Amino acid sequence: AQSVTQPDIHITVSEGASLELRCNYSYGATPYLFWYVQSPGQGLQLLLKYFSGDTLVQGIKGFEAEFKRSQSSFNLRKPSVHWSDAAEYFCAVRGTDKLIFGTGTRLQVFP
Amino acid sequence: DGGITQSPKYLFRKEGQNVTLSCEQNLNHDAMYWYRQDPGQGLRLIYYSQIVNDFQKGDIAEGYSVSREKKESFPLTVTSAQKNPTAFYLCASSIPNGSRFGAGTRLSVL
């Protein structure tokens, strides 16, 4: 079955530190993968997506993600976190006719 | 700039009442979706529609109903059969290379 796993429910980092949010997927074919960010009480905003080609994709707000087929992973990274990055982050894979989301990772940033 | 508009932002339901959440898009997207979000459970798909006058149940459709009479509109009705309606509801529209989301409606029970 198609699924997405985000192993970390909650992550805390200091401002200026690097960040990596983990995402593992289960999908039979070549996956279309997405990362979304959600600020409290708001909708989801697309950070980046991977369909094919270069396995390192760049997104908005300084985020990047690397697709690793051998590990079924699509981890999100940022070299230096800003306080405004505090939010919830969702990884998703495109299924047959819908997006399948992970349960999300809440990021807290300390000054 | 096109987008998705959800209204109202906050909604209160009385016991036994049906309420309808509005979702309108001007992106010319064919597919539209309704998700329910509860703390710690991510997004769960309620209903989706790939084309006008057609829709399919998602993973948690019980207690909900939808219609798709126009491409731009995909309203969700939370019926009295939905015993635990308190949640954040998100509407999305989609083309194959990405989805756009509305700002959400928070539904509470009085």
Image (tube, coloured by chain):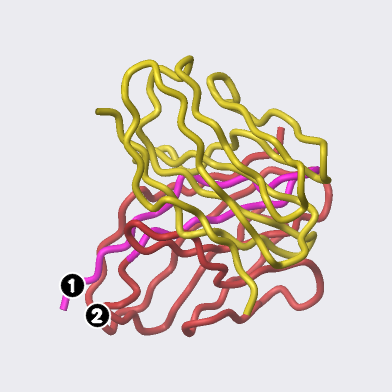
Chain colours: A red, B yellow
Task: Look at mark 2 in the image and give the residue it sits on.
Answer: A15
Spatial separation of the CA atoms under disc 1 and disc 2: 6 Å
- Residue B48: where, in percent of width, then height? 70, 39
- Residue B76: where, in percent of width, then height? 57, 37
At a point 65% along the width and 60% down the height, the residue shown is B25
- Residue B58: where, in percent of width, then height? 66, 31
Chain letter of the residue carrying label 2? A
Magenta span: A87-111
Q: Earlier in the sequence, mark 1 or mark 2?
A: 2
Chain letter of the residue carrying label 1? A
Q: Residue furthest left?
A: A111
User: In this orientation, which residue lies closer to the viewer: B25 or A23?
Assistant: B25
Q: In the drawing, does residue A60 fall left or right of residue B93?
A: left
In which quadrant is the C terminus of chain A drawn?
Answer: bottom left
Q: In the drawing, does residue A55 fall left or right of residue A42?
A: right
Does the segment drawn in magenta span residue A88?
Answer: yes
